[in-house]
Image: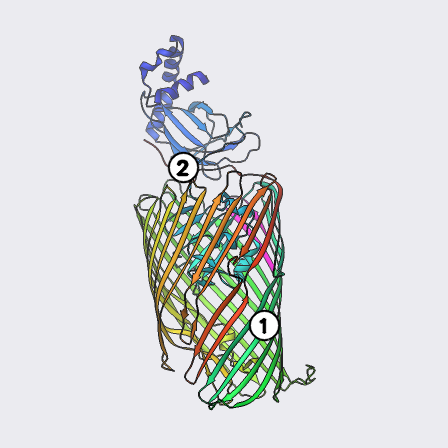
Amino acid sequence: MNDFLRTVRMLYNKQTNFLSLKAYDFIRVRVLSTLLFSLAFFNAALAQNNLKFSGTIEDCATKKPLANASIEFLSNTPGSKPMIGNSDQLGRFTITVPKNAVAIAVNLLGYEEFIADIKSLKQLSVKADTAFIENICLKAKTNELKEITVVGKKDLLELKNDRIVYDVKRDPKAAANNLQFLMSMQPFFSISPEGKLMYKDRVGNYLVYVDGRPSGLARYDPNAFLQLTQGRTVDHIEIITSPSAKYEMGGASIIIDVKTIKIENGYTVNLNTNADSFGGRSLGLSGLVRTGKWGFNFLSGLMKMANPSEYRNGFSNDYLNKTIVINTSKNENSNRSFNNSFAVSYELDKRHLFNVGASITKMSSLTNGLTTNNMFNAENVFLYNYTNNRNFKNDRDRYSIDADYLYTFKSDTLKKTSASLSGAYRYSDEESADLGTYLISGRAISSGQKTVQNGKDGEHTLQFDYSYTNKSKKEYTIETGLKFISRGNDEHQLYYPQNELSYFASIPTNTSDFDYDQQVYSGYLNFAKNYNKLKVSIGSRAEWNNTKGLPTSLDQHYQSFSSSYVYLMPVMNLFYLVNRSNRFSFSYKSDIQKPGSGLVNPNITVMNDRQIQYGNINLTPERKHVLNTDYAFMGKNGLNLNFTLSYEFCNNALERFSWMDADSITNTTWYNSATYQRIPLLIGVRKSFLDGKLSFSLSAMLMKTWFNNRLSELKSDALYSSFSGTLNYSFAKGPILYTRFSYDGSNTTLQNKMGSMFRNSMGLSHSFLNKKLGVSLSVTSPFQSRLITETNSYGLNFESYSSSVKENRQFSITLNYRFGKTSVPQRRNTKKINNDDLRN
């Protein structure tokens, strides 16, 4: 019988006709003719009723559904083509049976071919025009090829409409480095002098998601998450450069969506450690466990960072009091953190997915400083000298809980539609305690400060999202969602006098409290449609914000305050994908950045003996508008190009503002009084040579900025330039030699002008023990032992200058060891084929 059905298959191959049957004996042709005639009545019924066949493909041994199996219905017309469909993720299929159909064939990689005549299929039921048949099972092949090695020159970066996909698992550097390092090697990314990841020269200009969700440590401390997460635990990273209205950006420009590796069953664990010449240490442990429908992943890390001593000298010219203060100082800073996070997932079936996670972070930082001040009058006559010995300690605890649920609706294979509904609850809380002492010698000033801040009710977030996609000829996607956020914060400050031995008095001279509550109601609607090579995405977010604050203090009288506002934030993205290598895009977005509780708290915080800081209860969210045009090219020969021109403006910027009072004390607060305009031009080039062994990248930015403060009438305009680049060489036997460099030109804001600086680093990484052990050696600033920065500050009645010098050359070593036992999921087609994608 199988010989007959295979002969039937041969009839429908477009390279075959009846003349091809010469290779077959006469008897087989006679059998074929007889059986075709016996099926004539059945085929006539199909033609009359136009039946559809619906069923499920499964594994004969495990009874698990099999996705992406190819189903063919063969007719008895010589030379005609078979009708072909594919099973979905649950193994199901529904296909219209062609006229004169006589046989069915099912194929899937790794399984034996299933062939049967239609008449032998058992019908379970018939509803309307659809016949439901019993499950078809496939037998696994016993002689399946164990491993296939594909050699190619595919680039690590893939260009898509609204994002760039970074294939981390194929990057050799991922074996011995964390995500912060790997991302800093990508175009427009770099590392700040404080050791934080920057995008387009801005720290925090990004959000970090994990598998499409803003959860755990990645949500409230993205830089720590990138430092602790090792590259070998990640499959790929999606850099969403043009986020739709779905995402609440809060002033950030892009989203870094980290897609973790997937396994079917087993476990994988990564142990890593790092040490540097400044005394920094870190130890991390991360892993993933999968058994059946359950998944568990965890991330734990102990980090100690020790910054080298910083020496400063400068002066402050007080035009109001006609005095000049010349100062020198020495500062030391170190911090420790202990981060723990875990998540549990349960996949009930392909429609229901549950995720629950939690994280705990404990941090402690210590700052010691000694400053010597000499004061002179306008005639340069020495007045007096005094010394400020300060110690500042901060302890902070953070907690978070995340719960997510995703429901995928049954897809309509005929209309090519799919939909999903998700719900999420997130909770976070933070408690901190600050202790500051300021011991002044030479003047009758002695003070100390204790601050306790807790989350009160913490932050609660409830969110629902719905997505509908139609992939017919008029392909489009509709996304909508609602979000509610409730924040409660309570800050308590105690001020104690000190004696010369730095002992606190038992009774504070002043206390202050600040009780702050905020409720945010928001929603979004986004519509995206494909017009062949053009994709249009239009949407908007709407937000209603209610805030209440109650400040109290012993020495000052405040009244409670409240505010309420509504914002509409439209977003539009246009993408024209010429081909896989060329993309043009244009976008417009309106975004707001809400002031935190610290910026609206009017209670005075003593920074040191000569600086105080307090908030402004009248602040409103900063609203900015951004126009962006971009061209990206990613060629097959290893050449990548990117050109971006933007225009950004804001009429109520949250600007920090400082001035001198009558006691020569610097006062600092915030206003919505500044306006700014920015026009940045960015150029990125990436090229590989020597069959991919040598790669080079360079990113450059030129930005014109205008600032204006309506209250103080301060104005400034500046031209800022910067560039960064990387150079990598992969040796034949595996070691990778790399170097990266960056230059930041002098940068001007409304009241400050920072000098330029150059940074560079070199390193060597290699993997051993069948890529289980990764080792990385690096040196920062090998040709520049010290980092010198200069800052000028200006105000209506003062001018100041400071120069900072600190040790900059640093050596470090990183070790990463991976072990585990896993089974990799069956690879599926990257292009999804719906059940009714029939080839005529």
Left-right relation of 732 to 450: left
Q: Residue 14 carries which label?
A: none
Secondary structure state at the residue bearing disc 1? strand
Q: Is residue 307 above or below residue 93?
A: below
Secondary structure state at the residue bearing disc 2? loop
Q: In which quarter of the image is residue 691?
A: top left
The residue closer to the viewer here, 568 or 288, is 288
* Residue 366 % position (x, y): 62, 70
Q: Is residue 173 above or below residue 507?
A: above
Q: Which amino acid does label 2 sit on?
A: Asn
* Residue 249 % position (x, y): 43, 62
Q: Quadrant of residue 491?
A: bottom right
Q: Give the range drawn in magenta.
A: 341-359
Q: Which amino acid does label 1 sit on?
A: Asn
Q: Which mark is residue 331?
A: 1
Q: Which residue is under mark 2?
A: 835
